[in-house]
Image (cartoon, grey):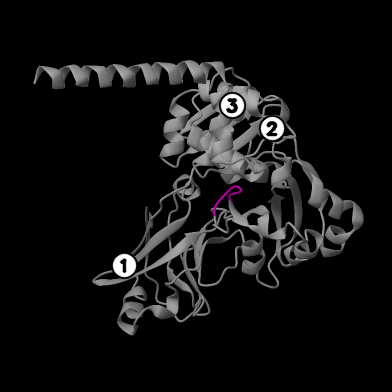
Amino acid sequence: MKIHARGHENVRATHAKTLEITGERDITARATCVVGVGAAFDAEGLALMRGPVAVRLSAGPHVATGTAVVNPHHEVTDRLVLRRSEHASPDTFAFRSTLVASDLDPDFAAALADPANEVTLTLTETGPRRPLVLVHRRDLPEPTGRPGLLWREADASVDLDAARVPAESRTALADGGVIAASVSGPLEGVSQAAGAWLADAAGHGARFEVRGDATGTVPALLAAGLPVAPAVHLGRTDRRSLAAPPHAELLRTASVPVVFRAPAADLGVLAEVLAGSFEDRRIAVPDGDADLGHGVSWLPLPEAVAAVEEGEEERVFVLAPPERGAWNVDLRPLLPLLVEQGVTARTLSTVLRPFGISRRDLYDALGDAPGTREKSAREKGARDKGARDQGRGEKKE
């Protein structure tokens, strides 16, 4: 995307933390971050950009380049600001910028101070994108702002109430697109096909944003590849609450995932609470990517605790149940149905691993299903036929 502006006699380009292009036609010498004036912004195009971007600023023969990351919560106004810091105010289009005003050499700054020169800022996504699933309940108002635009311009749409999910949605997942998913009620009541599709989306590394969920627990479970229920919700907590007997007992013994919001630094208390099984437990932690929606990474709990830095903000975590509780909720009868809906065994293996279900457990369970046995028998018959045909060919020779 190209943004065109003009030079201005008051451009100084000395700000060491930001770079800005404004729609205003006049500035004072105090606007040391401004490098162009009179810009016209494509609000829709800017709102649809996500993730890392390459930055290129040019004026006459002068060119400067850098990189930045689109602020997930930016709002398009009459100014576009790039910041070197992590500051993510709504007027910040992108942060972690490696190009700010003071990086421009004196000749470049002089060119920007000439009103006769056109100034062009080019922003190019460098990806690759992860899929983004926007879940909207039809009994709520349509999403507004940037999420609403992404919803309306989505690459595919999915009705989670339908018996089957359209095939084009899988293409959008594979391409890292935006999928608008609608549902009439709570996600606990979606069809088996919809549940399988949500799990498949998580297997593709999708991020999730759920309209009307203020806690972040539902998108965290979906991003972790887990159903919304069964799960234990502890809500907002801290190290003292996590160590308290009622919560501690749930963390130790719950046979389903436990989801909670807490300061990242408080994860360390789980080493004491889960004494004896700490080394074997896994936890889904936010992936840290600057993008819309909730994305997670599954880590061994000790690794997650070691990676936490003091002072990190509150996050939503999903603690996997102990392995001994893996089949307390018997998922085996559902597996053949999920396979019939197009969910691959590989995706199922990824999704069920946090429950302590190994790939061998999965294939054993699938092997017990009539449909799977019939398919295995057909495959075995085909292999035997191939072997017989090959044997006949060898005899003829």
SS for callout 1:
strand
Looking at the rendered structure, the kind of residue marked 3 is Leu
Quick one: 354 or 190, which is closer to the camera? 354
**Viewer-closest of 228 and 31:** 228
* Residue 126 as seen in the image, left or right of residue 273: left
**Within-10-Å neighbours for mark 2: few <14, some 14–19, many 20+:** few
**Residue 295 colored in magenta in the image:** yes
Q: Which of marks 1 and 3 is in front?
A: 3
Q: Mark 1 points at which residue?
A: 58
Q: Which residue is drawn at 33% across and 80% down?
A: 110
- The amino acid type found where label 1 is placed reads Ser
Residue underneath mark 2? 141
How far apart marks 2 and 1 lie (CA) works out to 43 Å
Q: Which residue is the site of mark 3?
A: 335
Label 1 CA crowd tier, 10 Å (few <14, some 14–19, many 20+): some
Residue lying at 50% horizontally and 48% vertically, measured from the top left? 47
**333 vs 203, nearest the viewer:** 333
User: Which of the 4 image quarters holds residue 141?
Assistant: top right
Magenta stretch: give its range: 291-296
| Badge 2 amino acid | Pro
Instruction: Determine if residue 343 is in view.
Output: yes
Residue 341 spot, x, y in % from top left: 52, 22
Numbered disc 2: secondary structure: loop
